[in-house]
Amino acid sequence: MRHPSFIARTILVQNNDVEAACRILNRILGREGILEQFRRTRFYEKPYQFRRRINFEKCKAIYNEDMDRRIQFILKKNRKEPFPGCT
Amino acid sequence: MGSFRKILINEYTHNKINLRNISVTTRQCREVDDRKEMYRSLPTMDEGTAGEKAADIDALINQKGDVFPDADTPNRLFKGVAFKELPVFNIRVTPNNTILCLTDAKGSPQLIRSCGSPQLIRSCGIEGFKNTKKGTNIAAQATAISVGIRALEKGVKTVRVRVRGLGPGRMSAIKGLQMSGLDIVSITDSTRVSWNPPRPRKARKL
């Protein structure tokens, strides 16, 4: 079995703290995109909606990648030139 | 958008002129002329997915690895019963209702021959909540408390919880079970999600 029940998507409750366990479970489901897929497949997505969504996601991924690179550049330590562009 | 005005107030006090700037923003009177706009302005429905986008939980998850089950978990003892032998509380959550059903470890409903009901299965509708009131977190919690007390009367103290679906009752039903005095060992999500589903029904027109 690939996803045995009560092993997959399961959180053990610690110290009777149910809410924390729920939050962890929800966070993991949200991070893995399971909730997103569930919400999206409740109703049929028309082809134009699909196209628009895919295009938007592509643009967003490109933007995020570039922004991450910029942030990493700014956060970089031990640069030879500490303030690039400010000479 | 509120208009932005500046009022200048002149104060004459003993040949001195004090100028004060007071900025006044008009109240944002939103004119809802479109139905879509109206739906957008409504508060989003609680789906019981608190913490879905909370990034601060990530560190917490990495910290404690013991919240996740492993290969030995099915045989681990909880109050003298193996994890795999524990009875299961199945909670079916929809936007309009919450149904709770107690089953044994194999999945067959535990038989209760009292009150004329064949098994321990209760929904918010059975519990006395009607129409839109069924799909609220309060209804889910009340139902969970009453069903939990019935389970305790039957002698079930330690349970696993399996939740399916999203809705307002998702978290509050689990909370209600805990409030009724049941000892919840684990929470499992079994929402049916497919990445190549059959064609779903057409989208709602709002």
Image: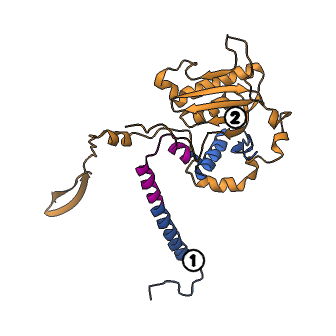
Secondary structure beneath label 2: strand
Q: Is residue B194 above or below residue B114?
A: below
The chain ID associated with circle 1 is: A
Percent position of residue A76, x then y: 57, 77
Residue at the spot x=22%, y=60% of the render?
B20
Task: Write down the residue under mark 2.
Answer: B161
User: Chain A, which colour?
Assistant: blue
Quick check: is A42 in the magenta stretch?
yes
The picture quadrant where one finds residue B78 is top right
Q: Quadrant of the C terminus of chain B?
A: top left
Q: In this view, does B164 lie above or below B103?
A: below
Residue B166 placement, left or right of B182: left
Quick check: is B139 in the magenta stretch?
no
In magenta, the rendered stretch is A36-57
Q: Is residue B120 above or below residue A40?
A: above
Residue at the spot x=60%, y=44% of the render?
B194
Name the one closer to the observer, B183 or B190. B190
Secondary structure beneath label 1: loop
Q: How crowded is the residue under tag 2: few (<14 C-alpha within 10 Å), some, or many (20+)? A: many
Percent position of residue B103, x then y: 73, 26
Residue B6 placement, left or right of B177: left
Percent position of residue B179, x then y: 66, 29
Task: Write down the residue under mark 1.
Answer: A76
User: Chain B, which colour?
Assistant: orange
Amino acid type of the residue tagged 2 in the rendering: Val
In the picture, the disc for residue B94 is none
Dot in front, 1 or 2: 2
Percent position of residue B168, x then y: 53, 34
What coloring was used for the rendering?
Answer: by chain
The chain ID associated with circle 2 is: B
Name the one closer to the observer, B26 or B118. B118
Amino acid type of the residue tagged 1 in the rendering: Lys
